Image (tube, rainbow, N blue to C red):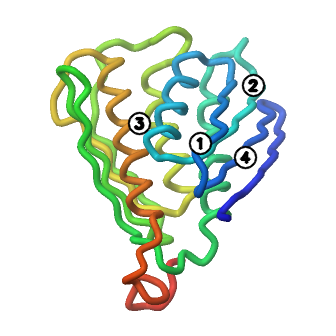
């Protein structure tokens, strides 16, 4: 089973996270940031993976440290759970409609970190979640998984719908990329490694 458990404590956050790439339950998210919990749940459900996140952050300041640090820890856990990446598809792409919005995510589990983020949000806040933190989360995730990640809003108006489409699309693209393909012998790279 491809699993990982990570605990990370700083002066700003305390995070416990467990992931299982080959199971769909349990999914339990508690970060203290309701909208973010909803988005992580969507990522897990559409990625068809088990994800448990318990985060205690300095929400009296704002939600920045909590959201970014969860992205860091989630990325570290995914990288650990993937191991040597033998047999995985490596690439994944998904377009997800959410009412009037259409989001896209395309990724490569190459071992090289890069984020291209193309989205504008008219509403600066959803609950206690600052919508600009969407990019911060995906940046932390991409750099700690060590993946190439492109996310884009093709069109849309509602900020909630736009962000939701990005999290769903990323989950679905991730599932495609981590799926073990019996036709792939060894690692899906001419280099012989994905790191």
Please tell me how crowded label 4 is: few (under 14), some (14-19), or many (20+) other residues with Cα within 10 Å: many
| C-alpha separation, residue under disc 1 versus residue under disc 3 | 12 Å
Residue 62: quarter of image:
top right
Q: Is residue 118 above or below residue 193?
A: above
Labels 1, 3: front one? 3
Q: Residue at x 42, y 80 (%)?
A: 182
Q: Residue at x 36, y 52 (%)?
A: 173
| C-alpha separation, residue under disc 4 versus residue under disc 2 | 18 Å
Quadrant that contains the N terminus? bottom right
Query: Helix, strand or loop at disc 4?
Result: strand
Which residue is under mark 2?
57
Task: Judge left or right: residue 138 versus residue 163.
Answer: right
Query: Helix, strand or loop at disc 1?
Result: helix
| C-alpha separation, residue under disc 3 versus residue under disc 4 | 19 Å
Tell me, for residue 136, which label it has, or none. Answer: none
Q: Position of residue 161 (x, y in %)?
A: 31, 21
| C-alpha separation, residue under disc 1 versus residue under disc 2 | 13 Å
Q: Earlier in the sequence, mark 1 or mark 3?
A: 1
Tell me, for residue 71, which label it has, or none. Answer: 1
Q: Earlier in the sequence, mark 1 or mark 2?
A: 2
Task: Judge left or right: residue 123 versus residue 53.
Answer: left
Which residue is under mark 4?
18
Q: Are marks 1 and 2 in contact (CB under 8 Å)?
A: no
Give whichever of 87, 132 is nearer the camera. 87
Q: Is residue 116 above or below residue 137?
A: below
Please tell me how crowded label 1 is: few (under 14), some (14-19), or many (20+) other residues with Cα within 10 Å: many
Q: Residue furthest top?
A: 127
Labels 4, 2: front one? 4
Q: Earlier in the sequence, mark 4 or mark 1?
A: 4
Labels 2, 3: front one? 3
Q: Residue at x 56, y 47 (%)?
A: 49
Give whichever of 50, 65 is nearer the camera. 50
């Amino acid at each position: 089973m491809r699993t990982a458990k990570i605990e990370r404590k700083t002066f700003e956050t305390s995070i416990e996270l467990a992931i299982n790439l080959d199971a769909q339950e349990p999914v339990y998210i508690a970060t203290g940031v309701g909208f973010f919990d909803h988005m992580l749940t969507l990522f897990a459900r559409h990625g068809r993976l088990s994800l448990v996140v318990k985060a205690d952050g300095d929400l009296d300041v704002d939600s920045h440290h909590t959201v970014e640090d969860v992205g860091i820890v989630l990325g570290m856990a995914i990288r650990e759970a993937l191991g040597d990446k033998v047999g995985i598809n490596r690439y994944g792409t998904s377009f997800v409609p959410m009412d009037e919005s259409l989001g896209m995510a395309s990724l490569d589990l190459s071992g090289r970190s890069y984020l291209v983020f193309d989205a504008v949000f008219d509403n600066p806040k959803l609950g206690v979640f600052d919508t600009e933190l969407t990019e911060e989360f995906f940046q932390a995730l991409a750099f700690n998984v060590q993946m190439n990640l492109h996310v884009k809003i093709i069109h849309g108006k509602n900020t909630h719908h736009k962000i939701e489409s990005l999290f769903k699309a990323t989950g679905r693209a991730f599932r495609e990329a981590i799926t073990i393909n019996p036709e792939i012998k060894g690692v899906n790279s001419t280099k012989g490694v994905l790191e």
